Amino acid sequence: MGRTYLVEEGIGQYLTELSTKVKPYVTGLLIGQCSPQRDYVIRAVRTPPKEQQQEESLGPPKLASLDEEWITTHASQVSRMLPGGLLVLGVFMIATPELAKDGQNALRKLIFSVEKSLSKRRLWKPTEEEVSDRAALQICSATKKVVCRTYDVQDPKSSAKPADWKYQSALTASWVALGCTVNVNIHIPLLATSPNHDLEKNTKNGLNRWSKQIEDSVFLINGQVKDEDTELLEGQKKFRGNTQAGIQFSDVKVLTQLCQGASPRSTATVQVCSGSINLRGAVKCRAYIHSNKPKVKEAIQALKRDIINTLSDRCEILFEDLILNEGPQKKNVGREYHVLPQRLFVPVAGSSVMLSDYKFGDEAAGEIQERFVEMLDQPVQAEDMHIAEDISTVDICPVTDSPSDTPQAQLTKATLLLKLQQNMGLVVAAAVAVLASIFSFNYFSD
C-alpha cells in the first residue's frame, strides 16, 4: 500500500491555473509535513522562471533542458523560509502530453538532487524511523490527469511506488503551534591551523557542537516535562483560550545542560587560535505539527530542528551577504561586529501556518515582499510582516600579533576547551596530589 497525501484544497486550483499557462512544462516544489500515518501538503510553489528562459524556449521542447541547479537552489532558498515541522516533500511537473513519457524520469532525478542539496546544509541527522519517501507529482496540461508516485531518498536504487493524492479543505485549521525563545551565547575558536582562517567553516563546526547541546536539552511544554511517547494534545483543553484562528499554541521552555557527555573524566584540548567568533542574542523559534494524534516526540523534534536551522540559516545568509559586499578574499585586520538578520513571520492566505523570512536592518519591506513573490509565488502585505525578535550579533575577535610573541606566549593565548567540571576536576586532583605528598613526607620524617 502506497502513502497517502492529504492536500490543501487551494493547491488544486493553483495547479490548474499553472496548467493553463504551461509552455511546454513547469516545475515546482511541494511543501508540507510527514507523519507515520500520512503526509500533508500545504503549499505548492512553482520554480521561478529564469531571465534567459524565454530565449531558450525557442527551440523544440525537451525535458533534457531542465535546469537542475536552478531548481535545487530554489529548494534551498525555500527551506530557509519554513518553520519547524515543514519541509520540501517533493517536486511536481506540469507538462504537455508529448513530454509526459519522460516526466517521471526527470522527476526522479530532481527528487534525489533536491534531497542531496538540502541534506548538505543540515546540522541534524534524520532518525531511523523517519519517513524518507518523497513525492513526484506529474500533471498533464491537456487532460489534467494527476499521477503521484513516491521514491525513497535513502535508497539511490529506489523505484517508484504509487501514492494517493487527496484534496481536503482547511487542512491546517486545527494544527498545533509550538514557540520558544532561545538565548544564544556561543564562543567559537578560530584555529591558527585553519586555512585562510575560514570564518564560515569554523562557524559551522562551532554550530555543529552547539546543535548537539540542543539535541540533549530538556523541553518543557506549557511548563511540563512530558513523556515522548504520549499524545501531545492529551489534557490540553484548558489551553483553548490561547488559540488563534483555530491553531492551538503551546509555549515551550528549553533547558540546556551545562555539561555534555556522561563521562565525568575528560582530557583538556589545547588549541592555538588566531581569534574567536562569538554569537550572541535571543532567537525566536516556531514549529507546527498536525492534529492527528501527534506524539510529544514529533513536536519536540520539529522545534529542535527549527532552533538549529534558524541560527545556521542566519549565519549562512550573513556570510553570503559579506561575500557579496566585501568579496571572498577579505582579510580580517581588526575586530568586527556584524548583525545577524532578524526573523519575521508572515501569515499566508489559505493556511493557518505562518512562514518566515530573514531581514537585515537596512532592507526595506518591499524587498521582503519581492522575495515572497519570487520564492513562494505568494504576495504578502507589509503590515502582515511581524519581526519576532531583537538584534542578534556576531563578534569576530582576532588575536593581535606582536613582534615579541614567542611560541610560549602564543600558547598562553590558546583556547582551553574545558567544561566547568573538568576545570574543577583538575584543581581537585592537584590538591589531592599536594596533600598526598605532604602526608608522605611527614610520615617518613616521623
Image: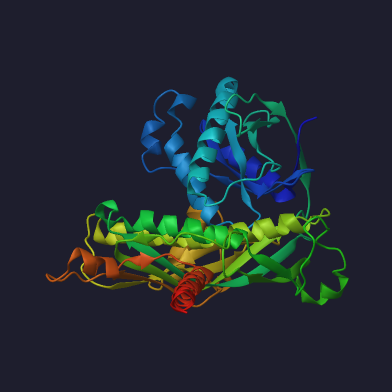
Residue 86 as seen in the image, left or right of residue 396: right
In this rendering, position of residue 154 left or right of residue 320: right
Write the residue at 52% across / 45% down.
118
Residue farthest toward the front in the current orientation of the protein? 446
**Image vertical order of residue 30 relative to residue 377, above or below:** above
The quarter of the displayed image where residue 94 is located: top right
Please name the residue shown 51% across and 58% down the image. 372
Q: Is residue 222 visible?
A: yes
Q: Depth check: 425 or 259 in front?
A: 425
In the image: residue 277, left or right of residue 103: left
Q: Is residue 350 visible?
A: no
Q: Which residue appears at 64% of the width and 37% of the height? A: 134
Quadrant in which the N terminus appears: top right
| Residue 100 coordinates in the image, percent (x, y) | 59, 23
Position of 296 relative to 187 (above/below): above
Q: Is residue 192 above or below residue 3?
A: below
326 and 92: which is toward the camera? 326
